[in-house]
Image (spheres, helix red, strand yellow):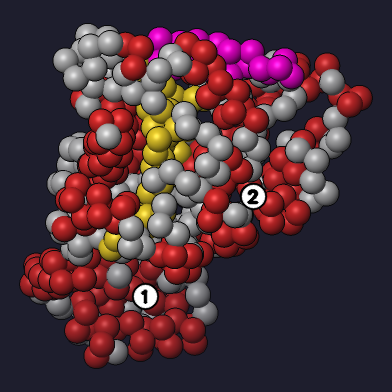
Amino acid sequence: MVFIMLQSAECLYDCAHVFQPEDLRSEERRPIHIGLAAEEGSSLKEAIAVDMFSYISADNLAEFRYFLLENDLVNTVYNWQWPYVLLAFLFCYVVYYFTVVVRKPKLVCGKGRLRTALDKYLAVVNERYWPTIWCFSAHLMTVCRVIFKRKPFMPYRRELVETPDGGLICLDWLDNDENDKLYPDAANRPTVLIMPGLTGCSEASYCRHLALAAKDMGMRALVMNNRGCGRDIFLKTPRTYSGNNTEDLRYVLKHIASVFPDSPVFGIGISLGGCIMSHWLAQVGDTQSQMIGAFIISVPWNCFHSTNSLEKPLNWLLFNRHLTQKLLKMLQRNLDVFEQHLHNLPYELDHVLQAKSIREFDERFTSKTFGYKNHVEYYNAASLDAAPLGNIAIPTMFLNSEDDPFAPGCSIPVDFIQENPSLALILTKYGGHIGFTDGMFIRSRSIVEKSFMQFAKAVLDNCKQEQAQ
């Protein structure tokens, strides 16, 4: 830092002398420099540093001069051999990466049929997870996945489905009819239902890669876009979505059953989508047979812990503010719909549009839309750690990282998952939020897709064995 200051001072000093009028360059017009910068034998560094602060009082300047120019520590830093310093830093960085960052994921699962199947099929927990070496921190991994992860082309077939309350749900299908070797009959081809995160849609890179993984396994993929989310998707009613409202998911599952009655459904929920899917699984218990397995990624277990984490300065700057703006833009894009129902809205629209954080948005809009008094009541109802997850009867696997800024590691109910024979958890030390990048260039298939493919194969093979019996 001192080196940069002094180098910058050199430039400022040269520029000042070039552009000053001739009469202002004389020592008579620079009284503060007399006895300080013009001392005989003074170094160039001293002259520059003093000149840079020529409008500071002489006493303060002398004090600063002593600190900056005569302090042994400052001079030592200034004279460092920077290539060696950088080399030492790089060496420590690499050692830390290989000794601390690279770890095998932890598998949390109680004894039973699910654990036996996972021990056989889930190879990712027996391999070291290699987070991308240049962005393994939670914030970098979360951001870099969005920026650098490639988005493979997906030839979606779009279907717009109207709900009983007059709303509109956009379904993007990847039929996979050309890949009919594993499942030549489209009627019984498994359907992978993907539910994106808070403001995500079928265009998100994680949705595309999961759809591609399903395609490679011969299955059909379907991305259920939340109301108002996605390209060219608009609201028809003022109602959107929340973390524990499962009505739209129930309707979409009925729609799938009407189109492909013999197709087993495998669910994938990401972040908020995983929260909705988990609540539905807990609600239906063993009363449904349509969904045969579920894979839940980066789900926020406790809404209070999540919002508290997202309101930390760096998290607010990188994530909270951005997501809040996207939510507000969705409302602004559909402003005409809200204005048509202005007299029936349980909130002040102008007040909602002034929200600065997710908590404020939920307090002013989401909680009121779904009949809660405030965000506290809504968060209590939406938090998964308070939901009856013990009712889940189908194989369900969660993927979380301990450093997730949206779902802090302290909020993950590891002991509870361990006690439920239908639940499993893959827990990594690093991964961020829906990050989980690996490989040097973040473009290869990550632990997310690998875990899904291995878990889905275990579930499908188990179904085939049960049918054969």
Alpha-carbon neighbours of circle 2 within 10 Å: few (<14), some, or many (≥20)?
Answer: many
- Chain-order first, disc 2 or disc 1: 1
SS state under label 1: helix
**Residue for point 28% across, 78% down:** 46
Q: Main secondary structure of the magenta part?
A: strand
Left or right: where does residue 295 sit relative to residue 366? Answer: left
Would you place residue 165 above or below residue 410 in this image? above
> What are the residue bounds of the magenta stretch?
157-173
Label 2–label 1 contact, CB within 8 A: no
**Residue for point 39% across, 26% down:** 264
**Residue for point 75% across, 24% down:** 238
Quadrant that contains the N terminus: bottom left
Q: Position of residue 356 (x, y in %)?
A: 67, 47
Q: Is residue 159 magenta?
A: yes
Q: Nearer the viewer, mark 2 or mark 1?
A: 2
Residues 453 and 51: in front is: 453
Dividing the picture into quarters, in which one does residue 72 lie? Answer: bottom left
Would you place residue 7 above or below residue 317 in this image? below
From the image, tell me which residue sits under label 2.
382
Q: Amino acid at mark 2?
A: Ala
From the image, tell me which residue sits under label 1.
50
